[in-house]
Image: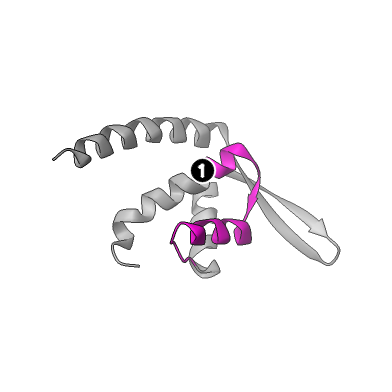
Amino acid sequence: MKFKDLLNGFIRLHILHHAAEHEIYGQWIIEELARHGYKLSPGTLYPLLSAMEQRGYLKSRKQREGRTARKLYRATPLGKKGLALAKVRVKEFTGEAMKG
């Protein structure tokens, strides 16, 4: 996708948005982002989720289902606080950018 560097922040915000509402997992978020036109591979998404977890925005837990294990992510209090601030900033910046 062109302009990936400009849109990467929106991907993180979208992940945080859903993780603040309910637990998410990799394949689900890949499909969710694809509905919005973002085609991410697991090789791109999982390092992003890991980095968000290391920075304290997400917390994960493993869920076992038979022989398979799935990593579920949820927004932390820090992630929710960051999301709230980002919503204010995005409204401010997009409002200014959309004028004229």
- Quarter containing the N terminus: bottom left
Q: Residue 70: name its quadrant.
A: bottom right
**With 96 as the anchor, is 31 left or right in this view?**
right
**With 91 as the anchor, is 27 left or right in this view?**
right
Start-end of magenta stretch: 16-40
Task: Kindly identify the amino acid type of the residue bearing the numbered disc 1.
Answer: Leu
Report if residue 57 is visible in the image. no
- Height in image: 39 above or below 49? below
Q: Residue at x 57, y 38 (%)?
A: 20
- Quarter containing the C terminus: top left
Q: Residue at x 32, y 34 (%)?
A: 91
Q: Residue at x 73, y 53 (%)?
A: 62
Q: Nearer the viewer, residue 21 or 76?
A: 21
Residue 13, position as x, y percentages in the image: 44, 45
Q: Nearer the viewer, residue 22 or 98?
A: 98
Q: Residue at x 21, y 41 (%)?
A: 98
Whether residue 7 is in magenta: the answer is no
Whether residue 23 is in magenta: the answer is yes
